[in-house]
Amino acid sequence: GFEGPGKSFQPPPFCLFTFALIFQWHITTLFENDRHFSHLSTLEREMAFRTEMGLYYSYFKIIIEAPSFWNGLCEIMNDRLTEYPLVINTLQRFNLYPEVVLASWYRIYTAVMDFLGVPTKMCWTVNRGKDLSPVESCEGWGDPASFYVAVIFLLNGLMMSLFFIYGTYLSGSRLGGLITVMCYFFNHGECTRVMWTPPLRESFSYPFLVLQMLLLTYILRYLSIYIYLIALCVSNIFFMLPWQFAQFVLLTQIASLFAVCIMGYIDSCKLQKILSVHMVSLVVCFILMFGNSMLLTSYYAASLVVIWGILELTPRVFKRNRSQVCMWVIEGCAWLVGTVTLKYLTSLAFGVADDAHIGNILKAKFIGYKDFDTLMYTCAAEFDFMEKETPIRYIKTLLLPVVLVVFVVIVKRVSIFIFLQVIYHALQLLAYSVLLFGWLFCKIQPRTLVFAILALMAIEGSANLQTQWNIMGEFSNLPQEELLEWIQVNTRQDAIFAGAMPTMASVKLSAFRPIVNHPHYEDAGLRARTKIVYSMYSRKPAKEVKKELIKLGVNYYILEESLCVSRKKPGCSMPEIWDVEDPANSGRIPLCTLMSQDSRPYFITVFENSNYRVLKIPNE
């Protein structure tokens, strides 16, 4: 439990277990309802892990199928399949520690169960009908995909226990913890996508963010006891290691703490201790990821150094009688300018351009900047602005109104001591939509009113849950299944493939063939390769495209006609994206359209079905 001056908090184990179990059952049920995952074949389960998910899972598969754990680890650290002909350390590039840990657990689990003679899975034949061949489907933790997904859901179930602890601790009441959990459930579709895309990196990181924020809040409320600073450091590491975008979340946190400090609600000594913890955890992650330079050249790392410098220099440079508001402006501007400048200089010094696209994405959002890489992001729904319906959904569940009312009342009524935490959490709220303030009602409102509001929340919240439970589906992708089976039977093991990023992840995972591009787009070299590969969807001459593909060593190109004609929104079809990048060829017929009609003389069609066409690239 947590202890502080004059109070002790011990979370009830039964409640923690219950909330973890309910949430784990909830997301497992949603995932099963959506895909009928338990009745899929091994190949179908692998195909269900689309895009990045399939890429990440492929490394888990490599380790569990290797002769030993260390052989598998060595193989992914000297990977020759992902970016042929390059040999890369995927632990350095792809935040793969979750797969390493889960693969070790799987190997231990199956070894122990085999030694004890306990069966770990049950298999049967599934008749798929519609002239499709029957497939074998296995269920149980002995099945690799089932084990992988089950552990992720278990981890996220434990996260719900952390939410309960968080709410209970901050409110001083179990009712506060209950409201926190219920608000999360009622707005579940807005809070996470783990039930639809379990292998994505945030599925592993999110629970450790909740733990990290809980520990940080305790440190802000009480003394900076070293055991809690060490725990904060560990939670930082566990949060950053699995997810490449964790640094941006921590950047907002550090910025919020700095704002709290310059307004006088936290002393600089305590903030420097917290900064030290962040610096140590950043260095540890840098080492564990074999010198991933993006960590040291990030805005987060620059911000840590700049804030430390401001805390050290401000008392020496400025006199105390200067206007408080003036000081806030000076220190805020110093932080902003210093962070951007230091980040630019470190990127220049290390020669890192991997995150250069981030600035271009921001420019695209606010000033209409366009280039190939930027459009590849901004045309995706995940990188679009927040939907107009999102705040309406928050209003319907009363979450947004309650947050605003609670914040206003607390600002007026609570003491400066508590206000410190409120300011910090409010700034975090502005930074990335923190949805956890329901518990604060316990401090300022009668319990009857709290229950009344919770009941009103439940009206729309239960409707949201029912909508999710009503989602019923069954995964099937027969065209891709035919493609992968054809590749396994009709191509050499060392045949090199290129194509759309999502499909390449499946080719690597299920056909185990070398590929030249993949969905992990946060690398400058990979973005350049992908641009060459996607030139098949441009209006360039076939001869020019073939020449560039041969330079990459490609033997087969997988053409998807849907990419040639699909248009998510105006200006976002692949030919339209290429018109921005290559205006000289604008107006010509897209090469992909020509290839769909007749691939000769530069390419040879060796396989085709309703979705895919495999083009063999003859040598010059």
Image (tube, rainbow, N blue to C red):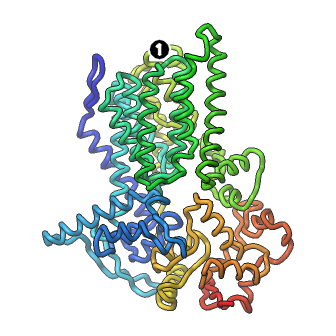
Residue at 56% across, 22% down: 313
Image position, residue 620 (x, y; %)? 69, 90
- Asked which secondary structure carries label 1, the reply is helix
Point out residue 63 in the picture as x, y percentages from the top left corner. Answer: 35, 69
Q: Position of residue 510 (x, y in %)?
A: 45, 77
Residue 377, compared with residue 205, is above or below; it is below
Q: Is residue 116 above or below residue 258?
A: below
Dividing the image into 4 quarters, which one contains the N terminus? top left
Type of residue at label 1?
Ile
- Residue at 28%, 29% (x, y): give it: 2
* Left or right of residue 53: residue 537: right
The reply, left or right, for residue 261 in relation to residue 13 is right
- Dot 1: few (<14), some (14–19), or many (≥20) neighbours within 10 Å? few
* Front-lying residue, 368 or 130: 368
Residue 371: image location, x then y, percent: 74, 58
In the picture as drawn, the residue positioned furthest to the left comes out as 116
Residue at x 63%, y 63% (from the top left corner) = 527
Q: Relative to residue 522, is residue 237 depicted above or below?
A: above
Q: Label 1: which residue?
A: 416
